[in-house]
Amino acid sequence: MSLQRQFNELTLGVQKRVEHAFEVEKFKKLRKTVPLVIGKINAAQKEIIPADEERKRTLMKFAQGEALLSKREWRVICWSLNDRIGKTKECALGQNNLWKQVEKFIRTKIAAQQLAKRLWMGMVYSYFSADITQADNTTNLKKLRNLLLEGLTSVEQAGRKERAWIKAARDCDHLFSAQPTKILAELYLDENIGVFNSLQEHVAIPETSWLWDSLVESIGQKVGKANDEAFRTRIDSLLNLGTLLPRYKDSLFGAALNRYSQAKFKDELHRRLKVVSLEHWGNPQIKSKANIWKAHLTDEAFRMVLNWFAREDLEYFFKLLQGSSQVDQARLDYWMRFVDQMGYTRIVLGRDAYHNRSADFMEFKQANKGRYSSLSGDVAQNNAFIFQIGKYYFVEFSAGGACYVYHESKIPFQVESIDLNTQTQLKIPYLASSRITHNGNWQPKMDYELRTLGITPSHEGIKKAEQIRKNSLANIPARKITSQTKVSSGSALHSMINAALTKPAEDKRHRDIEAAKAFIKILRLSVATLDNVSTGGGFWVFISNDPNPLVKKLIELGFLYKPGKGFWR
């Protein structure tokens, strides 16, 4: 009698003996416990592979022609059809005389509807652990495959109720076809993960089985042939399979990155693909780890990965680590042209950023374990960014100041050090090949200095940087500015702007800049700005010259427009 049936009869008996049926609700805990117990019983039904020593001993007895074998010995033999017998290289599946005895025994059990689960599971294990490269196994392996299907039908017909393992085996009976992974690959990529999990849980397939090799190969082929959009939707499935089958992470991650490098969106960072690959292979910007990446990636895919790391570090540094200066768009735009040449990048976090527990900072640290350092010998707000172009290492600081350039032969610090000091390691003027400030119109001077070092941006680098800049300016998530954006004349905006215009300032220019800041703030406009007023420079608003209220207001305040860059005052 099943546990569920006993519970139902118990409930019915109680109902007959109580005055009010609702009192049966006192058995709530029992109701919750029943499915848990049933689950444990089903889990306990998973077969345990016989020990090696027992398998060796039983196979020798079988090979020597022992006539009387016990039920347990036959079960052990079914699990051991691919084991080498004694000191020979032969196995029962590869020896026709031994295989015929096994086949005869199993067919007798099937005919009498006496085939036990343990015998069938043992044959499944032997089938999927077979060495399919051995020609001697081929014919008998096909016979074993047919025997498994006949045996499954026999077990189904003999059973009084369907077991979880029988349902799992029947749902995956395509595994016993000539092309077992063709359907399984489609099911998995279509995120029918339930079938896959059920297969792993209930069907005895070795971790080293040829089935998994074939499945990974089939999935790789399907992904390689998929169009860009179909591939994009299946990336997570590929990565999830790496978690389920850790032995195949190299193949799966490599297939995903190589295919991604061929897609039209290859310049778009796929964060999860980057993070899981970093966790598995280590930092590709370090020579000792780069070889691991290169072993699984094409040259194009490896360059794409390096660009991902450099670009994200660059944007993180000049966008999120600038403190009250907001986005340092000028330096970001300048260095973005060199991303395709940056072989190494490392962010050095000052005390404020290093101990910051906000979501942005915690996400960065989690996704870049081992790729950032802590900064000492400086104010808590300052951070540093180290990057390599050719034979030179550059050090930029978020709080401004000069950019230090060191030849690789004279670099005064270990680039992979987890702790770096500004005064004793990062700012050493007498060792620097160049020291370039960012005052005034600094870009032409920087261009000249880099040319003397043999460094110029590539045509492709300039093109990509310009496209990134345009996309950045066009993407305003907080509030999109259009010609239809309405501003009420009696709103708080005018009060704030008027307060800025009447605020004491040394000249009209400063009052206009304060008014522009007020306009941007009150409308919650997510536009990039750069404030160099305190260092003698100007105030920039990086926005195109399209008709909208912000552009109109900037013009009214005397801002001038520089094509391809934005408005300045």
Image (tube, rainbow, N blue to C red):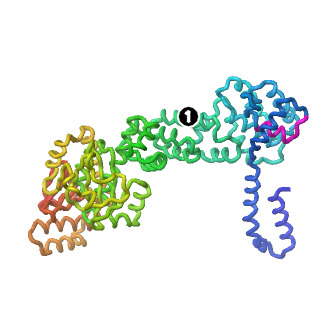
Secondary structure mostly seen in magenta is: helix
* Percent x, y of residue 162: 78, 47
Q: Secondary structure at mark 1?
A: helix
Q: In the picture shown, does residue 447 fall above or below 426?
A: above
Residue in front for this viewpoint, 348 or 140: 348
Left-right relation of 52 to 251: right
Q: Dot 1 corresponds to which residue?
A: 217
The residue nearer to you, when weighing 440 against 88, is: 88
Q: Residue, x 64% and y 45% (percent of image)?
A: 195
Task: Name the residue: 76% across, 73% down.
Answer: 26
29 and 10: which one is in front? 29
Name the spot of residue 86 as percent of width and height, x first: 76, 32
In front here: 279 or 37?
279
Task: Give the quadrant of the N terminus.
Answer: bottom right
Q: Is residue 437 left or right of residue 60?
A: left
Please state the extent of the stretch shown in magenta in the rendering: 68-79
**386 in relation to 494, above or below:** above
Q: Tell me where residue 255 appears, x and y as whole percent.
A: 48, 38
